[in-house]
């Protein structure tokens, strides 16, 4: 129970932090020059929101998962509440669907990466 509440708190904080950081990174990636042959929707999805929002959500959520040592599901639920709450408080919930989707994809990818079992450390030769 305590681990779940800890995960929800870390997830809530990471969702709000991603919202605050993505405002700047989406602005930077939107300023990249688009090649003339690239479709606008594909450019927006991969470069502007993929790098500007999805990558930020992946890195922040992965750091929160590593620091909290909590199960991925409560942390992901807290992230969703924090991200939606941030969007609602800033008045962008109606128009910010692309950023919200990129955040959720990035956080889900981080949860899947963090949920993979780690290889056990090999003992040093001669230790025994």
Image (cartoon, grey):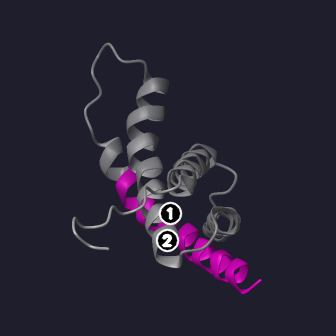
Tell me the residue at 41%/28% (across/down): 43
Label 1–label 2 contact, CB within 8 A: yes
- In depth, the one of 20 and 12 nearer the eye is 12
Magenta range is 1-26
Please say if 67 is above or below 30. below
Please say if 8 is above or below 80. below
Give left or right: position of 59 versus 71. left
How far apart are the two marked residues, 1 and 2, measured between alpha carbons? 5 Å
Badge 2 marks a residue whose secondary structure is helix
Please say if 105 is above or below 91. above
Give left or right: position of 12 versus 56. right
Residue 83: name its quadrant: bottom right
The crowd level at tag 1 (other Cα within 10 Å; few <14, some 14-19, many 20+) is many
Q: Where is residue 101 in the image (x, y as percent from the top left)?
A: 61, 45
Q: In which quarter of the image is the C terminus?
A: bottom left
- In depth, the one of 32 and 79 nearer the eye is 79
Q: What residue does disc 2 label? A: 64
- In depth, the one of 36 and 106 nearer the eye is 106
The crowd level at tag 2 (other Cα within 10 Å; few <14, some 14-19, many 20+) is many
Badge 1 marks a residue whose secondary structure is helix
């Amino acid at each position: 129970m305590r681990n779940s509440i800890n995960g929800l708190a870390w997830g809530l904080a990471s969702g709000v932090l991603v919202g605050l950081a993505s405002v700047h990174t989406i602005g930077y990636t939107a300023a990249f020059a688009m090649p003339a042959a690239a479709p606008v929707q594909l450019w927006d999805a991969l470069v502007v929101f993929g790098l500007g929002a999805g990558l930020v959500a992946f890195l922040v959520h992965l750091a929160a998962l590593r620091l909290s040592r909590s199960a991925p599901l409560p942390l992901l639920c807290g992230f969703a509440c924090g991200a939606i709450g941030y969007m609602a408080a800033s008045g962008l919930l109606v128009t910010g669907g692309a950023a919200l989707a990129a955040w959720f994809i990035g956080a889900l990818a981080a949860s899947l990466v963090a949920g993979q079992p780690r290889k056990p450390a090999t003992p040093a030769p001669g230790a025994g």
